[in-house]
Image (cartoon, helix red, strand yellow):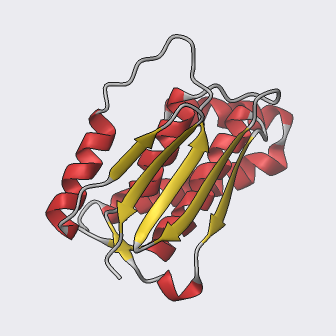
Amino acid sequence: LFNSLNTLIAEIEYNPDNAVRFTKNLSSVYRYVLQSQDKTLVSLAEELEFLDSYLFLHKVRLGDCISCVCDIPADLAEAMLPPLTLQLLVENVIKHNTITSARPMKIDIFVLEAHLVVSNPVQPRKSHESTGVGLKNLSNRCKLMLGEEIRIMNEKEVFTVKVPLLV
């Protein structure tokens, strides 16, 4: 929230039109967070719509050096998963990787064998270690609600998380 508010202040001063878009997306993000708190599962379509607003905030904050390619078949839009799954996974990408105009980040999201797959190149930050708590919590929620844990593939050049979907 504080990063977003600081970004908004800068946008108001330097790019007022974008500040309006930023404020609308910030509102959408927090509305979704509040509305999804009481839900155990949400549709993939809802998560993807939320992700658009969430990514917009980060693109303004980081510069236009983060992109996301979603290849989701229309017939899977109503597949269910825990709320804020995509927020956690994208936040992990941003938190654990160097993202600059010289080293942009491309996140790929697709479905494979009833799993939502989120994949990104590994561009590790020099001074940041992971506790793994966020992914462990997501895995526990998936196990509880969907009967299956997430799968994490941390290869040398690509980091991938597979989240089970209720189709």
Q: Nearer the viewer, residue 10 or 117?
A: 117
Q: Nearer the viewer, residue 30 or 76?
A: 76
- Residue at 53% across / 38% down in the picture? 93
**How many numbered dots are placed on residues in this image?**
0
- Left or right of 56: which side holds 46? left
Where residue 81 sits, quadrant-wise, is: bottom left
Q: Nearer the viewer, residue 23 or 119?
A: 119
- Left or right of 19: which side holds 77? left
Above or below residue 96? Residue 26 is below
- Left or right of 4: which side holds 81? left
Above or below residue 153? Residue 33 is below
Q: Residue furthest top?
A: 127
- Residue at 29% across / 70% down in the picture? 41
Q: Residue furthest bottom?
A: 75
Coordinates of residue 153 in the picture (x, y in percent): 43, 44
Above or below residue 21? Residue 101 is above
Coordinates of residue 121 in the picture (x, y in percent): 62, 39
